[in-house]
Amino acid sequence: MDQAKVTGPAGTGASQAEIETWLAQLELSPESNLIEVLQAVQERFGYLPPAALREISRRTKTPLSRVYGVVSFYAQFYTEPRGRHTIRCCRGTACHVKGASRVLDAVQRALGVTEGETTPDLKFYLETVACLGTCFLAPAMMIDNQYFGRLTPQRVVSILRSYGLEQ
């Protein structure tokens, strides 16, 4: 079998054999809850490696097309590595009016990525969202589960440095 490394957001890799060994511990069967299994795999690897999806299909006797169908249906699942920290920039009306585009531009410049991309060092993943629900903090962003508001481009860079951005 392919012994290629599967790299997750923490920078650790797993071979095909390691994926198989880890999945064996889950004791998968055709009765296994596919969504729960996918969530566990993503929690472990940071995304859903193709090798893991093939092995889940085999162990649960679920057609691979169905496994991919579930993965592609739910926004919570990722088939590409994402950064250790997820940055969500708000594009809601209040944030837009108060300068969200300048905040997003500052994040993109600082990280060297655009929306939907992960930094090469796997530290950060950047996405935009319709609303963070913190309009009183506009313009706002979230890093992981932490909210930041009343942002300026200069403050964005300072915040990113506190999360390990090297410049």
Image (cartoon, rainbow, N blue to C red):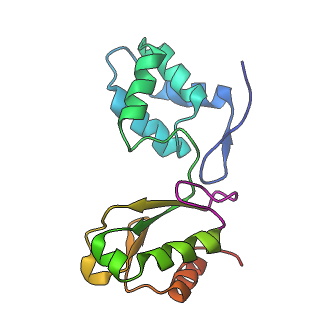
The answer to which image quadrant residue 15 occupies is top right
Residue 129: x and y in percent read 37, 61
Q: Nearer the viewer, residue 82 or 16?
A: 82
Q: Residue at x 40, y 25 (%)?
A: 69
Please provide the residue range marked out in magenta.
Answer: 112-123
Where, by quadrant of the figure, is residue 3 drawn?
top right
Secondary structure mostly seen in magenta is loop
Does the image show residue 21?
Answer: no
75 within the magenta span? no
Asked whether, in this view, residue 18 is left or right of residue 38, the answer is right
What is the quadrant of residue 4 in the picture?
top right
Which quadrant, please, contains the C terminus? bottom right
**Left/right of residue 123 with respect to residue 47 in the rendered view:** right
Q: Is residue 129 above or below residue 16?
A: below
Residue 20 visible: yes
Between 9 and 112, the residue placed more toward the observer is 112
Q: Is residue 51 above or below residue 91?
A: above
In the image as oriented, which residue stretches furthest toward the right?
3
- Relative vertical location of residue 121 with respect to residue 31 in this rendering, above or below: below
Q: Return the x and y of residue 14 as percentages of the image width and height.
A: 66, 37
Q: Position of residue 161 (x, y in %)?
A: 60, 79
Q: How many marks?
A: 0
Q: Horizontal and vertical percent for residue 109?
A: 63, 73
Q: Residue sitting at 42 percent across and 33 percent down?
A: 72
149 left or right of 84?
Answer: left
Which residue lies at the image location 51% right of the left edge and 43% below the top edge? 44
Q: Quadrant of the N terminus?
A: top right
Q: Is residue 44 left or right of 148 when viewed as pictured? A: right
